[in-house]
Image: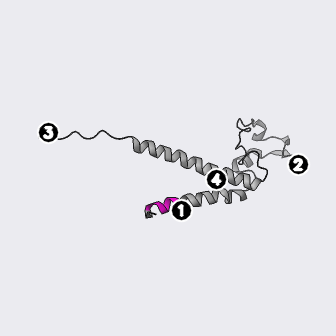
Amino acid sequence: MKRNRVFPLAGLLVALLLAGVVSSFASGSPDGLDSVARDGCTFDAQDHITGGTCLARHEAGNQTADSPLAGYGIRGIDNTHLSTGLAGVLGVLVTLGFGAGLFYLARRRRRDPAPAAAD
């Protein structure tokens, strides 16, 4: 294998391992923005707002909630670690495919050759 291909393949392997394994251990707690939006409200055991005043009261439903990859997982897979890991791997592969397609299109676009010098 050529040396110039080892680095990108190693990077792809690291990205797939991080997406597939490490993403399973991500925190289920609200992130910073969600946490700030919830400040000032009280919640019940099912995480529904029961009182108070906060930005989360004005939250609308997500339009992609019924998609196969909603909620950082793959619908239909009951094991949350496997579902999250596979969704991460799929995300890496889709991003790689999209980027490779853009590079292919950019490379394919050729410039007009310079006109030959007249003698």
Question: Which secondary structure class fits the magenta region best?
Answer: helix
| Helix, strand or loop at mark 4 | helix
Q: Position of residue 6 (x, y in %)?
A: 49, 63
Disc 2 designates what residue?
Answer: 45
Q: Position of residue 93 (x, y in %)?
A: 59, 50
Callout 2 environment at 10 Å: few (<14), some (14 to 19), or many (20+)? Answer: few
Callout 4 environment at 10 Å: few (<14), some (14 to 19), or many (20+)? Answer: some
Q: Which mark is residue 10?
A: 1
Q: Which of label 2 and label 1 is nearer to you?
A: 1
| Helix, strand or loop at mark 3 | loop
Examine the rendering and report whether any part of residue 28 can be seen: no
Looking at marks 1 and 3 on the same chain, the residue that comes earlier in the sequence is marked by: 1
Looking at marks 3 and 2 on the same chain, the residue that comes earlier in the sequence is marked by: 2
For the residue pair 36 and 76, the one nearer the viewer reads as 76
**Disc 2 and disc 1 in contact, CB within 8 angstroms:** no
Q: Please report the bounds of the magenta region as a residue range.
A: 4-10
| Helix, strand or loop at mark 2 | loop
The amino acid beneath tag 4 is Val
Q: Which of label 4 and label 2 is nearer to you?
A: 4
**Disc 1 and disc 3 in contact, CB within 8 angstroms:** no
Examine the rendering and report whether any part of residue 76 can be seen: yes
Disc 4 designates what residue?
Answer: 89
Distance between mark 4 and mark 2 Cα atoms: 32 Å
Question: Residue 28 in magenta?
Answer: no
Looking at marks 2 and 1 on the same chain, the residue that comes earlier in the sequence is marked by: 1
Callout 1 environment at 10 Å: few (<14), some (14 to 19), or many (20+)? Answer: few
Left or right: 116 as drawn, with respect to 78: left
